[in-house]
Image (cartoon, grey):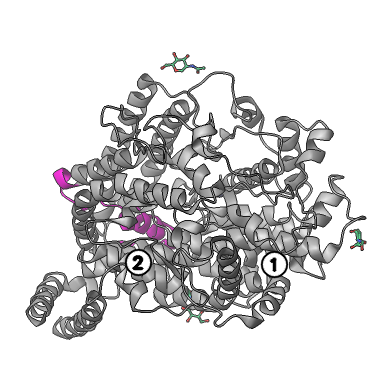
């Protein structure tokens, strides 16, 4: 063990020696071209060409996902290849300038954006290899199939159907904003085992979406949950672990060649906050007490349902019992944890059906929601080209998404809308993305983006928080509060929201904690570190022992597809912060969860100021303006306030609990192996820091 430690330290010293510029304050290896006029000229050309490139790529992606054919797939792959060639070329040009000599701060910002987030610093063969690796991992993930519970083993002759790219404008489909908000007041329907259920195929062809997801959401048979939980992991993680380790090596090299210490630091740079990690951790610490209350209540109800299966009254929760493959969204177990099962809840689907709603009418309502706040009407191109309902033909990938074609004309939504409350919410959500696109349309291409990676989702969700509350639905004539106990309805509503938003927070936080630690400390003990963090932050444990032959992080799409994740954590917090500010502007008094910003021009003005800036200013400035100088940080005060009434209810429920939170014992930890990595990595980071300081003194 000591020898290992020595070797690691030596290795780190060598890395630090060769990359000492990475320790400097400024992250860029600057070029030598000091001609500012040339830089301005380059940016003008870049803006024109990048917009054109973006238009062609987006159009080819649109054509593919709305009409999945081999021809359209090939066209899309060609456009993506051209686009990455363009990226490399532009990167080289941009990196040649000495940014510090460009007097215009907005131009400096644009140059830095081109250089900072790209992997184009890699030599061409490695750059290509990296892209290849990512698309191979996606292919493995997308083609993972398992047999139904109790059936014969996987048949390798089943053809693969994975596809490339095209998730650009889409969010984590398990992310709350996109998820099927549904507060069901129907009694829990007894789950039908697959044998009797025509929906489940009788051969080894079950995919994550929809079959496996559906089983995790609806089955209450522990052995079946365990089976799909394990089988999906067997068919993904181990098959792409080697590719992932090479991916870590290459992304780290790209980061170092760009001037960062490692790939994690490069990913975090988009937040423009030197103390980003500490800020994020602080946000987590402030929401943890609320999460622990929810966790304790859910654990008690699960114990009532499952009696043991690894559950203890004071322990962490086995990860397969929470209704979701990653235990990240617990809405599917609402039937088990509902505060007042005999009270109705806010699902207006049947009322919408009774009133003869159509998808078109839902989109018109959403447009009216935004125009009533003084925001923008949608252009005719939107209504002409969007895909708002499920078409008759096959070959459409139906995930809801909002599209900006980068030409300041063409904006579309793709959503196979059904007449339901969840789709009414989703309609407002996607349309908020379109509002964002419309508001920053006049910015240069490089600034047509959220203020930081968390903003787009946060804005879209902030606007929609208003849509599913009772006062709004009442105003729309979809809900009538007369005959119900309002307190019970509110608690049911807040519980449903908490199962999506609060339960999600520690998961969304830990994913990148793990990823950063891999970039920073290396690929040893990756699976054990994953579970160590899941236990620490989420209070969940694997239902069966795991080893380093497993690779459970590889069963999460955003890990293997190279998509940063902490943005979802921050977006979930920020959405409430923005919502609270909109409610303040609208003059709302009373509970935050009852605020409706419909028809408030003042709330609209606040939102449009946020959106107009795009990413032309640091997020901290935008937050400062939005909060009228109160803070420049993402703050969890609003989300805690929103859930306060539920938290009070939970505290009463949890009075008798041995512990609110979880005590982990040696058996919990043994499930994923003893850990020496943590201790070593802490020492290593400290030494790296010292070496950095020493290097700076030497320079
Ligand atoms: C789908 O794409 C094919 C090309 O692969 C094209 O011929 C066809 O017209 C498209 N269908 C629709 C409905 O757009
Ligand atoms: C926020 O403001 C404080 C001082 O007012 C400053 O020190 C800090 O760097 C700012 N944070 C960010 C992320 O800009
Ligand atoms: C029902 O809603 C109306 C209008 O929002 C409100 O004034 C009233 O207090 C509500 N009734 C109950 C019982 O909460
Ligand atoms: Zn979204």
Residue 586 visible somewhere in the drawing: no
Residue tagged by mark 1? 581
Q: Quadrant of the N terminus?
A: bottom left
Q: Secondary structure at mark 1?
A: helix
Checking the image for residue 531, the label placed there is 2
Where residue 369 appears, as percent x and y from the top left, is: 76, 46
Frontmost of labels 2 and 1 is: 2
Q: Is residue 695 above or below residue 80?
A: below
Say whether residue 378 is visible.
Answer: yes
Q: Position of residue 74 (x, y in %)?
A: 33, 24
Residue under the image location 69 percent in, 67 percent down = 581
Q: Quadrant of residue 112?
A: bottom left
- Compared with 289, 58 (above or below) is above
Q: Is residue 416 left or right of residue 207?
A: right
Q: 370 left or right of 75?
A: right
Q: How far apart in space, not on screen, are marks 2 and 1 (Cα)?
A: 37 Å
- Seen at 32% across and 56% down, the residue is 552
Percent from the top left, x then y, of residue 63? 46, 26
**Residue 333, magenta (yes or no):** no
**What is the magenta range?**
99-126
Q: Earlier in the sequence, mark 2 or mark 1?
A: 2
Instruction: Using the image as rendered, state which of residue 97 and residue 558 is in the foreground.
Output: 558
């Amino acid at each position: 063990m000591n020898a290992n430690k020595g070797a690691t330290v030596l290795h780190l010293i060598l890395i630090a020696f060769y990359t000492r510029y990475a320790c400097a304050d400024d992250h860029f290896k600057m070029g030598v071209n000091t001609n500012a006029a040339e830089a301005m000229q380059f940016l003008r050309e870049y803006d024109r060409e990048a917009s054109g490139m973006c238009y062609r790529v987006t159009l080819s992606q649109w054509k593919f996902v709305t009409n999945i054919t081999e021809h359209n797939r090939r066209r899309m792959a060609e456009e993506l290849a051209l686009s990455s060639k363009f990226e490399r070329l532009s990167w080289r040009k941009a990196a040649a300038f000495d940014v510090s000599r460009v007097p215009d701060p907005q131009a400096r910002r644009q140059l830095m954006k081109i250089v900072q987030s790209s992997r184009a610093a890699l030599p061409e063969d490695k750059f290509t290899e990296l892209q290849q690796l990512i698309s191979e991992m996606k292919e493995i993930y997308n083609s993972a199939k398992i047999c139904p519970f109790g059936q014969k083993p996987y048949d390798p002759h089943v053809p693969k159907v994975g596809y490339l790219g095209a998730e650009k404008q889409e969010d984590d489909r398990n992310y709350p904003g996109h998820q099927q908000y549904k507060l069901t007041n129907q009694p829990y329907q007894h789950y039908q085992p697959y044998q009797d259920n025509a929906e489940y195929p009788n051969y080894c062809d079950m995919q994550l979406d929809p079959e496996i997801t559906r089983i995790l959401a609806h089955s209450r048979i522990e052995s079946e949950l365990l089976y799909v939980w394990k089988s999906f992991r067997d068919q993904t993680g181990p098959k792409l672990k080697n590719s992932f380790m090479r991916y870590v090596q290459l992304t780290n090299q790209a980061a170092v060649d760009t001037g960062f210490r490692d790939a994690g630091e490069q990913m975090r740079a988009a937040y423009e906050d030197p103390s980003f990690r500490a800020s994020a951790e602080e946000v987590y610490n402030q929401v943890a007490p609320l999460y622990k209350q929810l966790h304790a209540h859910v654990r008690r109800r699960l114990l009532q349902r499952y009696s043991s299966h690894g559950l203890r009254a004071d322990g962490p929760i086995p990860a397969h019992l929470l209704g979701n493959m990653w235990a990240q969204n617990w809405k599917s177990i609402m039937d088990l944890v509902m505060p007042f099962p005999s009270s109705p809840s806010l699902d207006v689907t049947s009322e919408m059906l009774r009133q003869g709603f159509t998808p078109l009418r839902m989109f018109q309502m959403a447009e009216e929601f935004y125009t009533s706040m003084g925001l923008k009407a949608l252009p005719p191109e939107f209504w002409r080209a969007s895909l708002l309902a499920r078409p008759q033909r096959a070959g459409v990938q139906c995930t809801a998404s909002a599209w900006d074609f980068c030409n300041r004309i063409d904006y579309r939504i793709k959503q196979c809308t059904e007449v339901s409350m969840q789709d009414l919410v989703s309609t407002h959500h996607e349309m908020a993305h379109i509002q964002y696109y419309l508001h920053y349309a006049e910015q240069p291409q490089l600034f047509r983006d959220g203020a930081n990676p968390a903003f787009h989702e946060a804005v879209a969700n902030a606007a929609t928080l208003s849509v599913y509350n009772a006062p709004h639905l009442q105003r729309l004539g979809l809900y009538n509060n007369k005959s119900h106990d309002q307190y019970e309805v509110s608690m049911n509503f807040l519980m449903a929201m908490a199962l999506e938003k609060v339960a999600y927070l520690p998961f969304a936080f830990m994913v990148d904690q793990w990823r950063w630690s891999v970039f920073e400390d290396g690929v040893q003990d990756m699976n054990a570190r994953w579970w160590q963090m899941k236990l620490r932050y989420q209070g969940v444990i694997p239902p069966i022992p795991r080893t380093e032959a497993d690779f459970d992080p590889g069963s999460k799409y955003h890990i293997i597809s190279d998509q940063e994740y902490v943005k979802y954590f921050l977006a979930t917090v920020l959405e409430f912060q923005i919502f609270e500010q909109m409610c303040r502007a609208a003059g709302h008094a009373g509970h935050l969860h009852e605020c409706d910003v419909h028809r408030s021009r003042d709330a609209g003005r606040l939102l449009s100021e946020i959106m107009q800036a795009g990413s032309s200013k640091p997020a901290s400035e935008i937050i400062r303006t939005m909060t009228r100088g109160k803070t420049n940080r993402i703050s969890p005060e609003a989300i805690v306030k929103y859930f306060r009434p539920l938290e009070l209810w939970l505290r009463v429920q949890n009075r008798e609990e041995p512990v609110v939170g979880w005590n982990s014992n040696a058996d919990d930890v043994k499930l994923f192996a003893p850990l020496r990595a943590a201790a070593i990595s802490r020492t290593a980071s400290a030494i790296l820091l010292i070496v950095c300081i020493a290097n700076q003194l030497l320079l």
